[in-house]
Image (spheres, grey):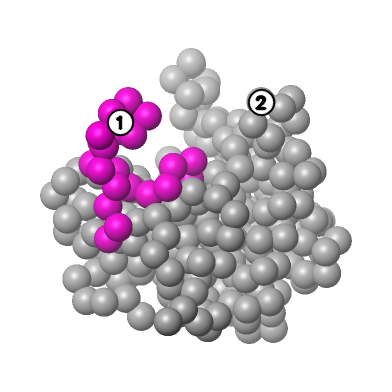
Amino acid sequence: MQTDTPVYERIVLKLSGEAMNEHGGRDNISPPVVREIAERVKELRDLGVEVAVVIGGGNIWRGLPAADRGMDRTTADYMGMLATVINALALRSTLEQIGVEARVQTAIQMNNVAEPFILGRAVRHLELGRVVIFAAGTGNPYFSTDTTAALRASEIRADVILKATKVDGVYDRDPNKFPDARRYDRLTFTEALTKRLQIMDSTAFSLCMDNKIPIVVFNMYKPGILRDAVLGRNVGTLVCDEAPPK
């Protein structure tokens, strides 16, 4: 019997930067799309879930491709971190427009724009019902926003990472190339490693495995998917420790 009681009390929602723009549109950040994301986050808050968000910056800038084209990698990565701050500010503004208190915390100090990342303050914001958006990555080059999500989830002791993607879970091979690709409903961390499934980069995945933080991979664009995920319904692919998740 399905209930409306969340199985996760505190989550980290990992969004790609591309989630902020409209497919086929010209804007790097589409206000209607950001509004839709904000409405979905509000739905989680209305359920009593404590929500932290990590957003990528790929809709604006990608450090690694720029480095591949000759730019200094460290500089390119810092530019990518700044792109995540722009996305975070857009989401915060939209959340506040629909009545949800939100704070942006950055790993690089920019006090006129956002709060610095302070763990105790972040946890307190969550306890008070505010959405916390973690920006500027880890503050260091050579680390992805997947690693940021895994690190912040470990620090705030989140119950799960909800990883929004363009596909509806983890497959044994690329479903866009192979029509017979099989989606996994559930995997252990060990199985994912053995099968060499690229769920997150290796640093992020190791953090989740070491700290036993489940990961739910799902299609962000499916209506009601976030609500179903926090209610523990069968959506996407759950990657967890051998023991049942909380």
Q: How many residues crowd mark 1 within 10 Å: few (<14), some (14–19), many (20+)?
A: few
User: What residue lies at 26% left-to-right and 77% top-to-bottom?
Assistant: 244
Could you say where residue 67 lies in the image, as x and y percent from the top left?
48, 23
Could you say where residue 126 lies in the image, as x and y percent from the top left?
63, 77
Tell me: 121 left or right of 150: right
Question: What's the magenta region?
Answer: 165-186
Asked if 104 appears above or below 176 in the picture, the reply is: below
Q: How many residues crowd mark 2 within 10 Å: few (<14), some (14–19), many (20+)?
A: few
**Residue bearing the label numbered 1:** 179
Quadrant in the picture for the N terminus: bottom left
Asked if 63 appears above or below 86 in the picture, the reply is: above
Could you say where residue 198 lies in the image, as x and y percent from the top left?
30, 43
Residue at the farthest right position = 97
Asked if 164 appears above or below 4 in the picture, the reply is: above
Q: Nearer the viewer, residue 83 or 39?
A: 39
User: What residue lies at 40% left-to-right and 55% top-to-bottom?
Assistant: 236
Name the secondary structure under disc 1. loop
**Of pointers 1 and 2, the one earlier in the residue sequence:** 2
**Residue bearing the label numbered 2:** 24
Name the secondary structure under disc 2. loop
Magenta span includes 244: no
Tell me: 245 left or right of 39: left
The amino acid type, in three-letter code, at marker 1 is Pro
User: What residue lies at 59% left-to-right and 54% top-to-bottom?
Assistant: 223
Q: Is the magenta stretch mostly helix, strand or loop?
A: loop
Q: Quadrant of residue 115?
A: bottom right
Please tell me the numbered disc located at residue 79: none
